[in-house]
Image (tube, rainbow, N blue to C red):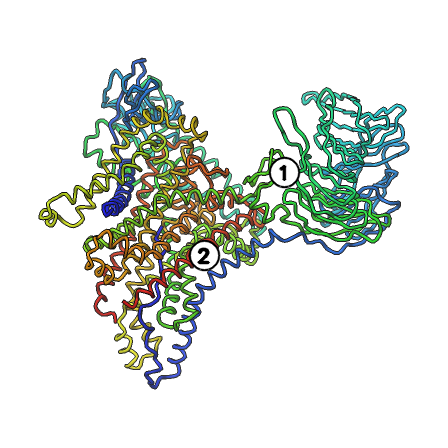
Amino acid sequence: MQPAPRLEPPPEAAAPNPSAFPVATSRGRLLLDRSAAVLVRAGGFAVVFSLVGILAFLLVEVAPLFRGANVSEPRALSASAGPPELLLADASLARLASVAADGRVTVLDAESGAVQATLPFPVAGEILDVGDAPGEPTFSALLGDGRVIVVPVDWRVDYGEANARTVSAVLGTPVELPLEPADATVVAFSARARASGSAAAAVLSDSTLVVVRRTVRVNDFTGERDEQLARFQIPSPEGVTRLVLDSDQRQLYGADARGGLYWWEIAEDGVRTPRISQTGAPISALSLLVGGRSVVVGNANGDLSIWFRVQSGRAHAELVRAHEISSQGSEIRAIAPSWRKRTFAALSADGSLGLYHSTSERTLWRGKAAGEAAVAAVLAPRGDALFVASANGVRAFDVRNPHPETSIAGLAAPIWYEDYPEPTWVWQSTGGSEEFEPKLSLTPLAVGTLKGTFYALFFAIPLGILGALYTSQLMDPRLQRWVKPIVEIMASLPSVVLGFLAGLWLAPRLERYFPGLLLLLVASPLLALAAGAAFRALPARLRGRLPPGTEVALAAALLAAGAGVSIVLSGAVEGMVFGGDFGAWLQATTGLAYDQRNAVVAGIAMAFAVIPIIFAIAEESLSNVPKTLTAASLALGATRWQTLARVVLPAASPGLFAAVMIGFGRAVGETMIVLMATGNTPLLGWSPFDGFRSLSANIAVEIPEAPHGATLYRVLFLSALLLFMVTFVLNTAADLVRESLRRRYSGN
Amino acid sequence: MISLTAGALAANLLLVGGLVALVAVNGLGHFWQADIAALVQSDGTTLLGEIADRELDSDESGQPRERWRVAVGNRDLGGSDFRWIDASQVTGESWPSDAGVLEREEWGRFYGFPVAIRNGESVRVEGTEPVWAALPELLRENRASRAAKVDALAAEIRGLNGQIERLRREGRDTNELQVRYEEAASALSAREAELLADVLVMRTADGREKAIPLSQVVRAVRANALGARGKFALYGSRLWEFLAGEPRESNTEGGIFPAIFGTVLMVMLTSLAVAPFGVLTALYLREYARQGIVVRAVRIAVNSLAGVPSIVFGVFGLGFFVYLVGGSLDSLFFADRLPTPTFGTGGILWASLTLALLTVPVVVVATEEGLAAVPRVVREGSLALGATKFETLLRVVLPAALPGVLTGLILAMARAAGEVAPLMIVGMVKLAPSLPLDGEFPFLHLERKFMHLGFHIYDVGFQSPNIEAVRPLVFATALLLILVVLSTNLTAILVRNHLRRKYAGSAI
């Protein structure tokens, strides 16, 4: 890395104006001259354009993150025969199935609304009620004889002539689950079916809960199917009116009209007693988000909240209200979750419709479903369309909703994620399954950045500024000519080399000799003082004859020896102060663990990159302090140190401040060193012995895997934008400070 | 207190010197062949290898002990390349003159004693001494026959592959070529099998025998019988292989030529792109602009551009150059190859342009200094003789300011050569199948991905499974990178100092 090159304003007036020298000139030459002027001006502006262009481009890439959903005006699809009870959409948005109260399935063209087919319910019998299965292409029906039938809806794609794609709905083999309610009637039910098994749960009018489970085991060898039917019955709390079973068929959630939210666990051998939470208002709609962990609750006041189970204690878990959505104003009738993201739509009794996201608690869109009371709503599996059914037919909304999961608060404030005991800051962009909840908090990364920067500046500020002070004020000018290029060379050391040395050479050694480093930190100022004292103790005659730079060489020799002795004594210090093992001592006294690649290692390596920048700018501002000032101070009898501390330092302090700011900017943006010298763990914490991940390293780690245009991609652009803004502000401020400083002293 | 400032400066200088010395010692040591030791341990086992490290340590009870790190190789026989042993457990130490080390195409180094050279079932040479005597000639023979038989065929297969790919894109029949391709491929595998028939049988220190095909042996070194001259010759040969050879074993062995080539080519392209941009800006600031708000804006832009973290340029390069510009180019000109991107993915062109943006401030600052040093009287003389402003610039001012422009370009090149983070996302790869410059039309393949010294350090040092074994190679690469960057920087500093001295008296 080079030191940030600084551009200075010209000390003299611009070049003379050629028009002051009127000379007869041919037209061609004049033309050439003018076009050259245009070209050069354009080139000059190109730098401004690139800077503004980079900023604008980053902004354009980031902006969609904070836009709400784009929902079209509704299209009316033709009225289906009979009022639909629930809807099922095909992922390619070609077809829509609407299920009537009598179990008949009407397949509509999702574009034109034309009826494609009408399929009768595959099982004979009187149908009392139908129900959906959030996130799965099935629906279920309750028959008068107490059987629950789960019917899969398969979307079959055919490619006809000329590759014309036609989609048709086919009802799969129905699964039968006998509830055997005896004399009681079924108040609420929920059922699911998948290849490995199916289950139905129902609350009966005699306050019992019945769960019927059909497990299917297929012998891979013989192809033999082994089906087992289990029926569990336990007493149920009074008044449960709604049930929803999760897709694993292991958790059952229920709601009553008084606001109670119930959660039963269905184990292999039975149903556990329910855990009950009070939501505060009568629950009117209940659904599950993708992954089956989050329960969306809509109540009679139009409020929406998301609940999930949180472990409190070893064995105890309960449902907690993790997210709240601003009220929709009127009783929630239906909740339609997306199959891919934690987005859901909610439909109110007054026909108002909203699109929300659970994690970010964002209201993405609000609108009106229809004039008349709507009864059912469904989000297409990819979340790109919303269908709302009312007594008069179905309306379709096209939805564009690419980035529902980010909000400004969500990027900075703690967020309560599923499976976490409390709201927290987490960066975890990708997970193992499709149901993964992305956790995109920039806070741990920003804290990591600041932590690394802090340790870098901790080493770099004293070394850089004190070194510059000596070089500019006390050093023989002949030596200055050597020292400055050496520091420039230090600046040019590629950061990948620094990172490599820090990660593979320094980190293991520091782990062994950390007490030695502490010893060196204490000893090195003392050694420097000792070197100075020794130098001054020499007789003045001898001192005068020594070559310039002897003082520095003496200090260097003592410091090198000090470093060696510190390493040798490290073991002894460890034994005396830290009980023989620094890592164990640290763990025992502070509870901090010692990572081999930690913030101190990265800080030392980053200091290498920052020192030359601070040194160069500090040296320049110190040199700019007029010699007349120092001369006057010395003439008045001040000592060298008094002159330095009371005259030179105050005069140059804005420049030193600018040096620190620019050094800060450099450390904030450093990527390779952080990547290589820390463990890259995006965990929030200030411990110097932990690794960290900075914003910049995070970009380098994640952007090669981020799909173009996805939320993660844009969030990484947002971190780049943050880095850009921070460094831009720091640099511009530092520039203004230095310019005013220069103007103040330019008169001398 | 003054001593503290001197101490701080001394510490800075120590840090720089120590770092460069550390890299130099470790990097240069990589090519040196140490003697091979046979170490008999108290449990009766014998280790054969090079003692890489000796360090003092304390054991569980706090007693000091000496530990040796021994490079034992033989990864394919199990275990790792390095073994830590307790020095007090070593009961016998000898330096057998017939022991040798083989550098191989696969599995790293092999330490052992040669037993015989066989071809299939028939024994060609037997006995340690005869094998050592015959080995160089047989290796050369094997290599020559490989070059004659295999390499030409492999090149033909590559050509056929390219043709088939082209025909397929154009939607034409590829059957005939497919047949030829199959034939060539089967001939190739037959010849390779033939070459594998010549094997060198080696015996390890613990008496196991291992047959290694001669075509797998890159170099066979009888280390303890080399003598000083032999060792220096070996050092030179290894250094040459490192600089000019192809990488082996996913970059962890062999040379780094493609990385050097990629770095140099990218730096060249960068300087081509940045030169006009930077020089025009400097000309504008110094020669054309009137001081005012616009000039201040340009100056702030230049200084801010210099302070923006390099990774931000990488992100911009990915979004703008790769996806926006590259994606548009693909859909306009390379639609037949889609969805395989041509320019719509990282490549050397986008890397160079990204770095050009990054290095503009360096060029602007140096060029401005160069322009400022041109004395006003020279310009006025030219104008007085009737030259236009442009003619004055082109014939008088720019030639005089050329050292400044050069300084800027050299500094920009040094910066570009050392920068890694933005390149990781706009076109650098661990292992590029082909160089961006070759004999195939249009010779310079701007869309290709490339290898880079800095990325090589990151990738080999941090992503390879056997860090212990690759560390010396990474040190050598780091040393090379430092040398490249430092020498370009020093050149720039010298040019600049020369410039300053030349015009020191004449500035007005």
Q: How far from the left and from the top, in percent, is residue B164?
A: 52, 46
Q: Is residue B343 above or below residue B371?
A: above
Query: What element does badge 1 sit on?
Result: loop
Q: Quadrant of the C terminus of chain A?
A: bottom left
Amino acid type, label 1: Glu
**Residue B258 visible in rendering:** no
- Which one is earlier in the sequence, the residue at label 2 or at label 1? 1
Q: How far from the left and from the top, in percent, is residue A334?
A: 78, 43
Q: How far from the left and from the top, in percent, is residue A733?
A: 42, 58
Contact? badges 2 and 1 (CB < 8 Å): no
Residue closest to the eye, A441 or B52:
A441
Q: How many marks?
A: 2
Q: Is residue B86 left or right of residue A252?
A: left
Q: Which residue is mark 1?
A: A434
Amino acid type, label 2: Val
- Which of label 2 and label 1 is nearer to you? 2
- Alpha carbon of mark 2 to alpha carbon of mark 1: how far? 40 Å
Residue closest to the eye, B313 or A661:
A661
Q: Is residue B364 left or right of residue A136?
A: left
Is disc 2 surrounded by few (<14), some (14 to 19) or many (20+) residues within 10 Å?
Answer: some
Q: Which residue is mark 2?
A: A729
Residue closest to the eye, A331 or A382:
A331
